[in-house]
Image (cartoon, helix red, strand yellow):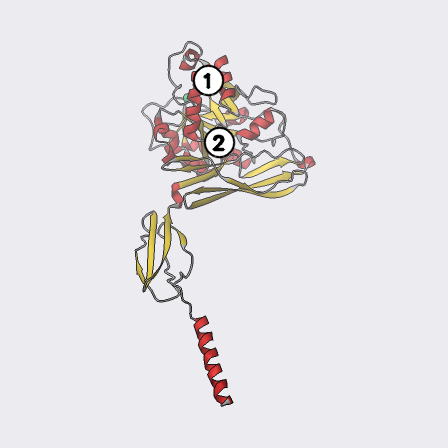
Amino acid sequence: MRKKVIIGLLIILVILIIALLIPKNLELKGDSEVVLNLNEKYIEEGTNFKSEVTGTVDTSKVGEYTLVYKKGSQEVTRTVYVVDPSSLVVGLYGSQNTLVREGDPYIESGAFGIDKENGPVTEYKINGDVDTQTPGKYEVTYTFNVGKLKKTVTRTVQVVAKDEFEANTDGVPVMMYHYVYTKDNRPKTVNSNYILDTDFRKQLDYLKENNYYFPSFDELRAYVDGKIALPKNSAIITFDDGQAYFMQNGIPIMNEYKIPATAFIIGTKGAGKNLYPYATEYVSFETHSYDMHKAGGYIGHGGIISAMKKDEIVKDLQKGIKLVGSSNAFAFPFGDITEDGKKAVEEAGIDVAFSTVFGKVNVGDDYRTLKRVRVNGGIKLEDYIDNL
Ligand SMILES: [Zn+2]
């Protein structure tokens, strides 16, 4: 009798264990949300029971795909997102290797993101701390999210010991270019605003060979305000107008050299009307006004700004800022500057504004009317070097 009871209990125990081990609910293997890059292979992980799947994933097309897994009356779903990483361009303002003199404040220059279809992405997360009291290397990362697409760009911040930091004392040249042409892609008439790509390359080679540092506009402003020192060899590269000859011939060169540059974009003209497909890592966009790059005024080059009231200028600047997603800098069209124009720059919250007056930027300058160094197309390399 006793033996039978024990066997009976054992059988019950085994049944209980089996019942506990067999899962009752249909569950997904893997994640319920999967993000894949365009043309990346989708690997089906299935469910804990054999189930019937409906729905498909086409990784050759951006989109959201739902898969439904069924077994009997049970069903679970998985969502697969296919994203295109090339649709979002991210880059840094200023130099990837940012230099800070020991003890100076770290100026956060930020990063830019441009969704090639929808325009600027101005929200992003910044991670990383910099201790400027302690020389060494630090990392700051900037993370952008557009829908399920995530992109990160990283800055190295190098805090240089005070006695090893050679500071700039004679001003920072902000080089002003316009258009770049090549042997095969040249306009009918080449004026001094056009520079041949091979001449331009020689200038960039010189900057590279001489270890030039390319500060951001935030750093330039801090320099003007006397808050930070910049390295001895510092320069900023700018291109006015955002015209096709720069976008087509200049941008690839900047990316090749990995030198940051700024394109001042006219909202209503040239590439300004169809700007975002040109977005690229090493060229950030700033405004050259939305619609003030035209005649109609009575000072300087006759730009319309002198016929406009402060509030009208502010409105135009705000439109321009919205187009490029940045208020770091502004280049006055034709260099025509008025009192209302200067006040408008302040009101629009622009960090630095540029004229076309020849010269370098120095500590103590008015941040609303900074000088630039015009680079004429035919300039000899030795003259270019003299102007630095
Ligand atoms: Zn212009």
Q: Is residue 63 above or below residue 133?
A: below
| Residue carrying label 1 | 335
Q: Which mark is residue 64?
A: none
Q: Nearer the viewer, residue 15 or 277?
A: 15
Asked where in the image residue 27 lies, by quadrant, the reply is bottom left
* Residue at 40%, 28% in the rendered image: 242
Q: Is mark 2 within 8 Å of ligand 1?
A: no
Contact check, label 2 and label 1, Cβ < 8 Å: no
Count the labels in the image: 2
Residue 218 rendering spot, x and y as whole percentages: 55, 30
The three-letter amino acid code for the residue at tag 2 is Gln
Q: Residue furthest right?
A: 163
Q: Which residue is mark 2?
A: 203
For mark 2, give the secondary structure: helix
x then y, percent, for residue 181: 37, 30
Q: Is mark 1 within 8 Å of ligand 1?
A: no
